[in-house]
Each structure stands twice: as C-alpha cells, then as structure tokens.
Amino acid sequence: MNKPEIIKEIVKGQYRQAALQVKSGGGSCCGTVLPADVVDPISSKLYGEKDTAGVPAEAMVASLGCGNPTALADLHAGETVLDLGSGGGIDVLLSAKRVGATGKVYGLDMTDEMLALARENQQRAGVDNVEFLKGDIEQIPLPDDSVDVIISNCVINLSGEKARVLAEAFRVLRPGGRLAVSDIVVRRAVPEEVRRSMELWAGCVAGALEESDYRTLLAQAGFEEIAVEPTRVYCAADAREFLRGAGLDVEQVAAQVDGAFMAAFVRAHKPGSPSRRA
C-alpha cells in the first residue's frame, strides 16, 4: 500500500475502535483512546445544551471533532448539506434541524461501525431528512453540483490526499455553494517526529496543514473568498493529553508544540450565482 492508503487504514481502524467504544459506554478523542478520567482537550465543550436538545446521547459521545461547524455555518431551510466524515452523526442531525423538512443532509463516512451508529442515532432522533452514505471523502459518491453546503468536523486533516478531498468538495458543490468546515490547522513548524507518528495522525494532529498550505490547496481546487478563523489555540497542557500513548517524550514535545496547533473554522465559496453565505 502507498502512504495515503496506509494512513486511511490506520484512521479507519481507530474510528472503528471509537465506534465500538461508544457502544460499550466509552468515548475517544479523534480516534485516539483516552482514559475515562481524562478530559479530551480537542473535542470537549463544543456543543451547548441548546444545540444538543433532542440529540441522542450516543451521538454526543461519538463526537470526535474539534469544532461546531453547524453553529458557524449559516444553514437555511431547504438547503442540501453534506458532512464529510460524519462519524456518529451529531453534525448531520443538528444540520437537519436547521434545513428543515424541505432540506436534505447527507453524512459520508468510510467506517461501517460509525455508519451503523449514526443510523441508530437517526432513528432515535426520529429524523427523516437525512441519508448516511458509505464512501471516501477523496471520492464523494454524489453527482456534480448537487449540494449547497459542505461541512466537516476535524476530518479533512486525517486524509493523506487533501488536494483530492478539496477538489471533490468543489465538484459536488453547486455554483455559489460554500465550504464551512472545522479543522485542525498548524500555526508554525512542528517537530518531524510528530509528523511521522501515525498514532497522532489518527488523533487529528500530525496530518494537519499549515494555514498557508490550506489556503493554497483551496485556491488550487477553484475556491474563492477563503478565510481561516481560529476558534481555539492548543497550549502545552493540551498537548500532553493528545501526545499520551504516542511513544514520544511527552514533556519535551509538548513544550515544542505549545501554541503550534489551533482549531479553526475554514470557509470558502465556489464561484457562480449568488447563494446564501456561511
């Protein structure tokens, strides 16, 4: 297997484990298993009580993201939304509320266990305007110009082929459509051992793009009006938690990555006829 395929298999394995852990009453951070008494520094405190009213507890536990794209993207009734890497389905279910009965939300995931969990959560929530699809974010199983908004929550950074992901996102968006994703973004250079760690790749860190590279790839895919807005900057104390279990010198590397990673809201638009903006 080539490197992107290896990365995909590792990420798939981690997320399969995460889904099974939710089933057994546990939780995890971006695919990286944390002890029950550890507060996840990346995926904690992303959703307020108002956001999650009526959302199954299992969808909340399975939330492995780094932001709340449904709160940041201004979704409107009747729109069609696609969530890349939908996991347990929380952002799909929240989006379904916003677009209403005349809208539609697709959740795309490559992991059978996560898809099964998401469909169970859909049934518990009693939501009809949702469809979960199996597939890769590098090859989206939808037609050209078929969705108004693409959201994603800490998933694009996990791909070993980010240019393909963004090109596919551009393809399936309608003219004037918008990309509104939460992701981990690198603010400055980080140690090479972090980049090499597949454990950390599955944990949302090693595969993150530097902000300038993110902007470049979006522009190369054809997007315009690109914006990267920090929502949270991770400090050394946060780093100690997501470095745990990765086989690295936690104290040394934590100091080196202090402030180097941030959760960010990434916005961009596909050129074309005007549409409501995220």
Image (cartoon, rainbow, N blue to C red):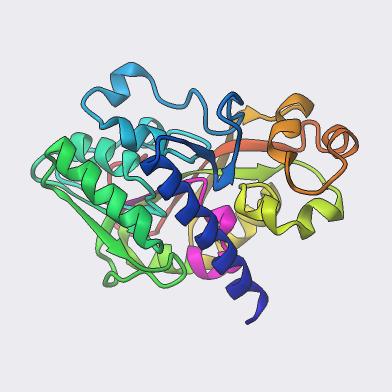
Residue 208 seen by the camera: yes
Residue ranking furthest to the right: 252
From the viewer's side, name the closer residue of 6 and 180. 6
Q: Please tell me whether residue 240 belongs to the stretch shown in magenta.
A: no
Q: Is residue 58 left or right of residue 223?
A: left
Q: Is residue 263 left or right of residue 210?
A: left
Residue 116 position in % (x across, y down): 28, 55
From the viewer's side, name the closer residue of 85 and 221. 85
Q: Please tell me whether residue 160 belongs to the stretch shown in magenta.
A: yes
Residue ranking furthest to the front: 24
Q: Is residue 152 left or right of residue 172?
A: right
Tell me which corner region of the image, top left, top right, bottom left or bottom right, holds residue 68: top left
Residue 152 seen by the camera: no
* Residue appearing at x 54%, y 55% in the figure: 14
Tell me which corner region of the image, top left, top right, bottom left or bottom right, holds residue 236: top right
* Residue appearing at x 75%, y 48% in the figure: 246
Residue 269 position in % (x across, y down): 42, 52
Q: Is residue 180 left or right of residue 102?
A: right
Question: Is 144 rendered above or below residue 48?
Answer: below
**Residue numbers of the magenta segment:** 149-166
Q: Which quadrant would the C terminus be assigned to in this image?
A: top left
Residue 261 position in % (x across, y down): 71, 38
Question: Is 164 rendered above or below residue 267?
Answer: below
Residue 107 position in % (x across, y down): 30, 54
